[in-house]
Image: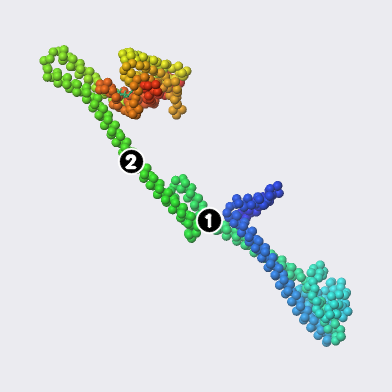
Amino acid sequence: MRMAGNLLRNSLNAIRKGRDGVSADALLAGKVRRMSLSARLILLLTIAVGVVMALGGYFILRQREEILARALRNELQAHAVTLQLTLEDSYRAGRIGDAQRLIDHLSENPRVFSVILFDENGRVAMFSNPLEAGKIVESPDAQRVIATGAPVEIVRRRGGSEVYSFIMPIRISAARRGAFEISQPAEFIKADYARARRDIALITLALFAAIIAVVLLVMRYNLLRPIKELLGGAKAVGQGDLAYRVVTPSGGNEIAQLASEFNRMAESLAEQRLAAERQAEGRLALERELRQSERLASVGRLAAGVAHEMGAPLNVIKGRVEMLRENAGAPAEKRARNLDIIGAQADAITDIVRQLLTLARPFNLRREAIEPSRLISTVVELIETDAAKSGVKVEVIGNNHHRPDVVEGDLALLRQSLMNICINALHAMAQGGRLLIEVAPEERRVNGGPFVGLRVSDNGSGIPPENLAHIFDPFFTTKEVGKGTGLGLSVARRIIEEHDGWIEAANREEGGAAFTIWLPAIPDDGRRR
Ligand code: ADP
């Protein structure tokens, strides 16, 4: 009922808007399209039933009116025939008083309006309804009936209402013929008609109510509830709950089929997800295995590297020790030389162990604010002599980029890192060249934080492209035995990564290699003093 009220309100609103200029029909059509399913069904069914009931009611009423009119006429005719016989009897027997009594008697019947008796001239002789008959003196209709002897049936207005009249001839004596008119109000038909109309209207209203109730119930239990269930299912599945199953309504109708199809779909999705998860797990396990074997391989490489690097000095030591043991009586000078060699080889081993420890141990950084140019100049001091020996010209470009950035870190470790890179550059330019150490002109940003770069460029041999991926691996070296351990760059990288930075290595277009150390920068004014 509330819905019907809404409907009515909607329609009224639509009509009101229509008056403001927009077509009410178009608005109503738009509303119907946007209405809920139940409202639309109710509206359409109501219209259909309304039209059918209006047409059916019209025909039923028409028929009923006709039947009633006929019944009324038949009744009137029966009265008329009885009255004719009785009146003729009374006249024949000379008992005119009986006629008057009969007329009075008849007019007591509420369904008889009046009875008027006319003499042979068509003038009123007797009447039952003084009010009416008083106004009539002569009746042309009665005169015609008297003249022809044939009864007449007419409809006329009397006393403000419609009446059916029947005029019948009567034989007053052998030579004389009179007539009488018996009338019946048509009100009965009108009242009956109104009652029938009211009944039809009530039935229509009851039908409307039944339609609304049935539509609402059917929609609610057969459509809306399962659809709500399906919506809930779709939402749950959409949010990843593939175990969700909707309740399948009984009856096997389309909605039930849809619900079971939905459940089947969710099931197949769940299966697919399970398969995908299994696949991913398999991939993960494979990756884990791969990483494990990689780790094992790198441990093996490291062990091989250590064995290789330490093997040579240990062999030398062993040889010299044997020499000393076998030639106990050797001159002191020779013995001292052997001992020196043993000491130098032990130093080499110590150096390798120290570097290995640098790679493995946790750092305890002693941080301080360092200006890049200061770091560069301390390194230049350390390599100057070696550079001069190889005929390498060392150039420094300080921080002239108007960015007074400083880095924060452990000066000794950063120096070692930069040194390792510079020494490699010197090794690459054994026949002389130019070594450039500078603060990189460009600035890098990672996660919004600025990084300052220290770049070491040489014009030496450069790095073969196939080696680029390995130069930072421990014990990777291209140098001959005794020249390099392959630990310099891995130590340098470890130190820089401990400072939250990274190292980039590249070949230069003009020949040679360039290494850049990137370190997080702190603005000059923000540094701790
Ligand atoms: P090592 O210097 O002991 O060989 P590193 O780890 O320092 O070990 O270097 C690894 C390798 O990287 C070197 O053997 C060399 O082949 C290559 N390399 C490093 N720096 C340069 C450079 N500036 N130019 C050419 N090759 C380089």
Q: Residues within 10 Å of mark 1 (few under 14, many from 20)?
A: some
Q: Is residue 124 left or right of residue 285?
A: right
Amino acid type assigned to the residue bearing label 2 in the image: Ala
The amino acid pointed to by label 1 is Leu
From what the image shows, is residue 50 above or below residue 380?
below
- 36 sits to left or right of 165: left
The image quadrant in which ligand 1 is located: top left
Image quadrant of residue 206?
bottom right
- C-alpha separation, residue under disc 1 versus residue under disc 2: 49 Å
Q: Residue at x 18, y 16 (%)?
A: 339
Judged from this view, the residue extending furthest toward the front is 510
Q: Is residue 213 above or below residue 417?
A: below
Q: Position of residue 332 (x, y in %)?
A: 14, 13
Q: Residue 255: where, in percent of width, then height?
A: 50, 56
Quadrant of the frame with the N terminus: bottom right
- The label shown at residue 107 is none
Q: Is mark 1 within 8 Å of ligand 1?
A: no
Q: Is residue 389 visible?
A: yes
Residue at position x 59%, y 56% in the image:
41
Dot 2 alpha-carbon crowd within 10 angstroms: few under 14, some 14 to 19, many 20 or more? few
* Tag 1 secondary structure: helix
Q: Which residue is mark 2?
A: 285
Q: Position of residue 391 (x, y in %)?
A: 33, 14
What's the residue at 84%, 71% (across, down)?
A: 131
- Which of the two residues, 86 or 44, is positioned nearer the viewer here? 44
- N-term mark: 1 or 2: 1
Q: Residue furthest left?
A: 329
Q: Which residue is mark 1?
A: 223
Pinpoint residue 320: horizontal percent, then vertical percent: 17, 19
Q: Helix, strand or loop at disc 2? A: helix
Q: Relative to residue 276, is residue 479 drawn left or right?
A: left
